[in-house]
Amino acid sequence: MKAPSSSQPHSDSILWALPVCQMAWEQTPPAVRDYIDSLHQQIQDLEKQVDTLQGRVDKTSKTSSKPPSSDSPFDKPKRNPRKSSGKRGGKKGRRGKGPTLLSPTEVHWIEPGPCACGHGELVSLAPYYTHQVIELPPIEMDVHPFILQQGTCSGCGQTRKAQIPSAQQAGYGPRLTALIGELAGMQRSSRRLIQDFCHSVLKLPMSLGAVQKIIDRVSNAIVPHYEAIATLARQARVGYIDETPWYCQHELNWLWTLSTDTVSLYLIHPNRSKEAFAALIEDWQGILVSDGYGVYQDWVNPRQTCLAHLIRTARGLSEKRDPHLAACGRWALKALQTLCHMAKAPPTVGQWRAWYARLCRLINCYHERQDDAVR
């Protein structure tokens, strides 16, 4: 191995890493000192690489933007269940909460049997408790055949054929259509499961193509509602925007959302790009709350980084091997958690100024660093 040139400057900081005194170091030949200095620099570089790679391995949903489903099932924190002196369930003296009484379709009055003494009849009967039984009525499909007739005109001899009424052309009524739309949209049931449900519960044979046509009808029917939601979302002063992978027919798409205090607008787009972002917001110019995605960072209007993302980043930083980075992470994590508590318990003017002063001090202490503390 070729030793480094003796003309290469070496740092005195290496003395803190070697078990030698200043005199012994100065008596060491320059070529050896340069070589030791280069090895020390290599060790520092390798330690940084190990720290970076270890940080990737140690990333979880609590220290990064990874989804909780990516966490290892063997690394879940152990819970310390609270010890209770009593049994499970409601405690003695606690007011219970029974089922909600619904509007009855039929009322049954139950009278007590004869008294065991056998010497008289019961008088002053009064209700003291209502036991409710809920049952599904027998499910029977309403089938309405529309028999189309044809006839010959007695005047000209032409054949006239009746046409299917426009309201019945789909072949399935609005209630059945709404039920299948609910199963597919809100309950996330597959087309195959919906087909099985119709066959086993409704006793209705239905092809997968028919299921898809009904779902398409529901999609077309809710377009005006979707447009109304989009209008409200794009008029909001503050918008929370995020995106996530969305597979459609085994192809990668992206599900975008613009959420406000009142509505959430969703958009499925084939790309995760500036064009998709523009298609979601259109002419919206409000305050953007988002993660650190580059498209969001180019937002020219006011933007607030999502505090949940910052908290996860700070927690990951607090677990770094570098003591300075770990201290920065703990400091930032405490400041962010305090800020979240302020949303529920508004601080006084003095408390706010003290918190803001600590935040400015945190920024001043680490803003010149070129590592994760700044990012």
Image (cartoon, grey):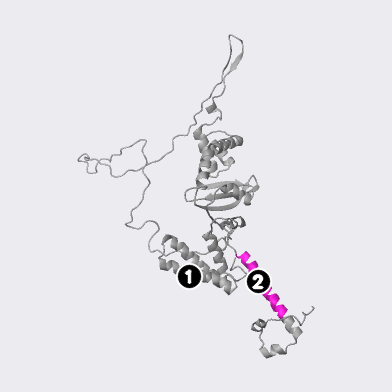
Is the residue 366 above or below the residue 215 in the image?
A: below
Compared to 328, does 117 lie above or below? Answer: above
- How much space separates mark 1 and mark 2, taking CA atoms? 32 Å
Quarter of the rendering containing residue 36:
bottom right
Nearer to me, 84 or 234: 234
Residue at 36 percent across and 50 percent down: it is 97
- In magenta stretch: residue 45: yes
Give the image location of residue 130, x and y in percent: 32, 43
Residue 170 % position (x, y): 56, 30
Residues 3 and 57: in front is 3
- Find the residue positioned furthest to the top: 155
Circle 1 residue: 357
Q: Quadrant of residue 104?
A: top left
The quarter of the rendered structure image containing the N terminus is bottom right
- Magenta highlight range: 37-58
Q: Nearer the viewer, residue 214 or 105?
A: 214
Q: What kind of residue is marked 2?
A: Lys
Query: Mark 2 = which residue?
Result: 48
Residue drawn where x is 49% and y is 29% of the image:
142
- The secondary structure that most of the magenta stretch takes on is helix
